[in-house]
Amino acid sequence: MDHYIDITLRPDPEFPPAILMNALFSKLHRGLVDWGGRDIGVSFPDVAPGKRTLGARLRLHGSKASLEQLMSNGWTHGMRDHTEIGATTAVPVETSYRIVRRVQAKSSPERLRRRLMARKAIEAEEARTAIPDSAAEMLPLPYVEIRSRTTGQQFKLFVEHLPLQASPTSGEFGSYGLSQSASVPWF
């Protein structure tokens, strides 16, 4: 985690930044899946507390070699008109760290009902009474909307930036560039 690349969304009169970030993050996810590496993390330096969007900048974190290898696989094609891609740059010496992780909400009452019906062998109406539509959990976190490569379903991927920490924590990053335990530099 000694280098980073900033990818900044250019203003576009036809598409709001959130829509462009959804597309950029989806392409990154596909690029990370195709590449197969577990040592690249992401952060969103422009995220603002209390806002539901992640801002207009995506920062990739990793070793210089890993970042250059990821960028060479062409995952940014189709986004070049909408983004400005910075150079691979060394992380500043004086920096903090933070974990950027995915948080999953229990947001689908229908899925919860199906699960309850399968576990308890109850009828649909009984499950609807037990889990009303109002049971959907909405997180107050920023998110990107992406489509799953495996199921094809569109969903909200909620992202949480945990508090700053003085030293890094190691670990692996998933195919979204997020981790429950590994930190990324924050500056």
Image (cartoon, rainbow, N blue to C red):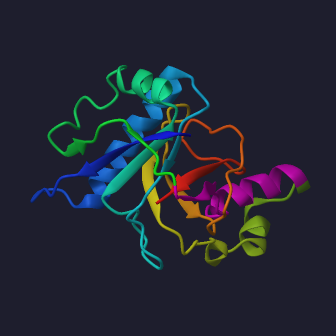
Percent x, y of residue 14: 12, 57
Residue 113 lies in magenta, yes or no?
yes
Residue most toward the right? 120
The correct choice, above or below, for 27 with respect to 114 in the image is above
Residue 47 location, quadrant: bottom left
Residue most toward the front? 93
Residue at the spot x=52%, y=39% of the render?
2
> Is 17 left, or right, of 158 in this rendering?
left
The correct choice, above or below, for 133 with respect to 13 in the image is below
Percent x, y of residue 109: 65, 64
Q: 64 or 128: nearer the eye?
A: 64
Percent x, y of residue 48: 42, 73
Residue at the spot x=46%, y=46% of the render?
91
Percent x, y of residue 40: 54, 36
Magenta region: 94-119
Residue at the spot x=43%, y=25% of the render?
70
